[in-house]
Structures are given as C-alpha cells and as structure tokens.
Amino acid sequence: MTVLHVSGAQVWGGNEQQLTYLINDLDRLGVTQKIFCFSETPLFNAVRELPIETLSSKPLSPYSAEYRSFFANVVKKHAIDIIHLHTSDSVTGYVVTDLIKNLKTPTLFARKGIRNKTSFLSKQKYNYKNIHGILCISEYVKKHFGAILSEKNKKKLVTVYNGVKVEDIPKNAAFKLRDKLNLSAETFLIGNIANHTNAKDLPTLVKVVDHLVNELKVTDFHLIQIGDFSKNTDNLKELVREKNLDSYITFMGFVENASSFLSQFNVFLMTSEREGGPSSIVEALYHKTPVISTKVGVVDEVIEDGVNGFTADVRDYVQLAKKIARFKSMPELSKQFSDLSYEIFLKKFTADQLGKNTLAVYQKLVRENAISKNKN
C-alpha cells in the first residue's frame, strides 16, 4: 500500500506533530508513504528526517493550475493507493484537482479541530462525493463536524484518537519552575499550556484565579501559563492588573518542550471554549498530572467528573474555581486521578494505536474501492 499525505501547513503546530507520529508508526507497520507539502516550511524540514519520500513544491494556491498539475502527476506517477488530506486547504486542492483530473483514488480527510462558523463553500467541499472517509480526533469533533454533513456523508465519519510517541516526550524539564519563579516547595502550582488564541479562552483562566482569591479566599497557590503571546496578550495582562492578581499569575510565553513541565504542576487547568484534542490534555494524562478542564474536545471521553479529574461547562469559571479548591483540599485525589488517567492514556493514546487504527481505515477504503471497481 502506498499512501500520499497532503498538507498545506506553513506553520508548526500540534497537527503537524501528530502527522510525524503517524508517519513513523505507519512505517513500522510496513506502509509505503509519500508526502506532498510546501518547501521551506517547518513541516518540510521535519519530514526530511523521517522515513518518507518528500514531494514538495513552492507554496501554491489550491485553486491554481500549477497545484492541480503537480498533485495529479504525483498521484499518477507514484501509483498512490490512498490520499490522506491533513489540512483544509489540501481538501480544497483535492476537490478542485479531482473535479478536473478525475484522480480515481480513495481519499480521506483528517478533521482535527472545531470552528464556530463554516462557509457555504466549505460545506460543499467537505460533502464532496469523492472524499471517502473522514477521520475525527475525538467524538466531540465527530459530533460537531457531522452537523455540516449530509446524512449520507455522516456515515463516512470515524474516530481515531491522536497519539503520543512516548519516547519523544522529554520527561525532564530544562529547569524547575519553582526555582525560576522563586516559589516555595509548598506552593500549589496550577499549570496551563495554551497559545493566546481566542479558542483557548484565557480570560476565563484569569476569572478562575480571581474567584479563587477574592471569593473562595484561596491564596496559597500560583498559576503558571505557558504559550505563545498574540494580539490578545496585552488585554489579558491588563485584566490581571485590573483584578490585582499579578502575584498569582505568571505568563511565561513560549517555552521549549512545554509538556516536559507538566509533571511539576499540582494540577493542569484548561479553560478552552473550542478544541479538537487537545494534545496538552493527552500529555497531562501521560505525565500523571491531574486535570481540571472545560468540557471540550476529547475531555468528556477521558475525564469522568470526580473520578479521574474534574470538568465544568465552557466559561463556567465559578465551577472551575470550586473544583480546584476542592481538589486542593483533598490531597488523596491526586494519586487517584493520575493513576486512572494514566491507564486511559495507555489504552487510547499511544502512537502505535494511532498507526494501527489509521491503517485499519486505509485498508477498509482500499477494500471498498476494489469492490466498487468490480461492480463497474
């Protein structure tokens, strides 16, 4: 079997990291792989070190004749059995190319996130008849994405969880957070790893701290927020100043190997309003760091409220704060939450599970395509 991965990603993120995990694991399973991506991008540089043939071009519009020609030639020249689309623009490029070039190749799309709005044209392309399968990284994504699909196309949806390559996760962080921030060993550390995007809803994070301090009178803690700054950062810091919370929150910005700091947190707090995964939750399970989170992405599928973590509705900073206070007052919950969550990680989220489950989808599409050809 020869698989062509297609990605138009020009920046590096969790989705690109997942693609590298998938490539490595499919290679171990004997799958021949090629990738069509744009040259001189972070993904291009990363995959050059992997067991995959890179077929790159300069960045092209997915509507352009040059894109169509390159894409179609790759599929024909390399006798591709499966096309695996990894980005929204790659879906656009595939649909346009297939309409004109008639690729006649089983194709699936990996849906990894949630959007508030979907345009009319986007709905048309995602419902395209020659997208034969849609991989969703959680039941949450499957449910939300299914809302824009026809009843017929909803049958194409299948859940394949993200995976984590355990050997690639640095266990030891570059430094101790308590030492760097001059915090005592007794300080209760609340951690958050998220770039400063709207979907991460970091204002709710600040409101959680405000409620803890000013309503619940919990003050012996410190929240450490790790993630890339953005145009939202100044407003976020201003909110902290307005509420006089500077001594309780540290924004560290981007930190290399952020997940390696998870084990230093007493609890990992996520306040996102939209998520596909996220990978930070899965990595917290691996590091045995207890999780308190809003009910987004994969959270409801891995955290049972009060059993192996705590959850609350989106933007419900009051409940999040109350559950942090409860967790903090019951130290026995820490081991219970972390042990049960680690078991879930081993069952669902290792990279070998990602590879095996994805390969099963590939094999199903190839079988169905063969049956269809025989009927014709």
Image (spheres, helix red, strand yellow):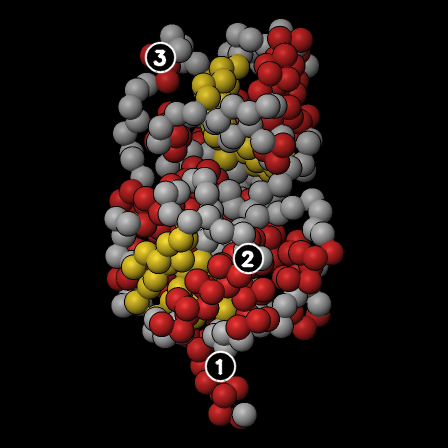
**Residue identified by numbered label 3:** 180
Which comes before the other along the chain, label 2 or label 3?
2
Please tell me whether mark 3 or mark 1 is closer to you in this view: 1
Res 82 visible: yes
- What is the crowding at mark 3: few (fewer than 14 residues within 10 Å), some, or many (at least 20)? few
The residue sitting at 71% across, 47% down in the picture is 117
Q: Which amino acid does label 3 sit on?
A: Lys
Instruction: Give the number of the disc on residue 369.
Output: 1
Name which quarter of the figure residue 179 lies in: top left
Q: What residue type is labelled 1?
A: Asn
Task: Look at the picture and state if 57 lies above or below 11.
Answer: below
Q: Residue 74's x, y, as percent?
A: 39, 66
Q: Residue 46's x, y, as percent?
A: 32, 45
The secondary element bearing badge 1 is classed as helix
Furthest toward the bottom, the residue is: 375
The secondary element bearing badge 2 is classed as loop
Furthest toward the right, the residue is: 120
Instruction: Give the number of the disc on residue 268.
Output: none
Evaluate if marks 3 and 1 touch, with contact meaning CB atoms under 8 Å apart: no
The secondary element bearing badge 3 is classed as helix
Which comes before the other along the chain, label 2 or label 1?
2
Q: Residue 211's x, y, as percent?
A: 66, 18
The CA distance from mark 2 to mark 1 is: 28 Å
Task: Look at the picture and state if 155 lies above or below 284.
Answer: below
The residue sitting at 37% across, 18% down in the picture is 177
Q: Which amino acid does label 2 sit on?
A: Ser
**Residue 238 in the figure: left or right of residue 120:** left
The CA distance from mark 2 to mark 3 is: 51 Å
Res 132 visible: no
**Residue identified by numbered label 2:** 64
Please tell me whether mark 2 or mark 3 is closer to you in this view: 2
The residue sitting at 58% across, 57% down in the picture is 63
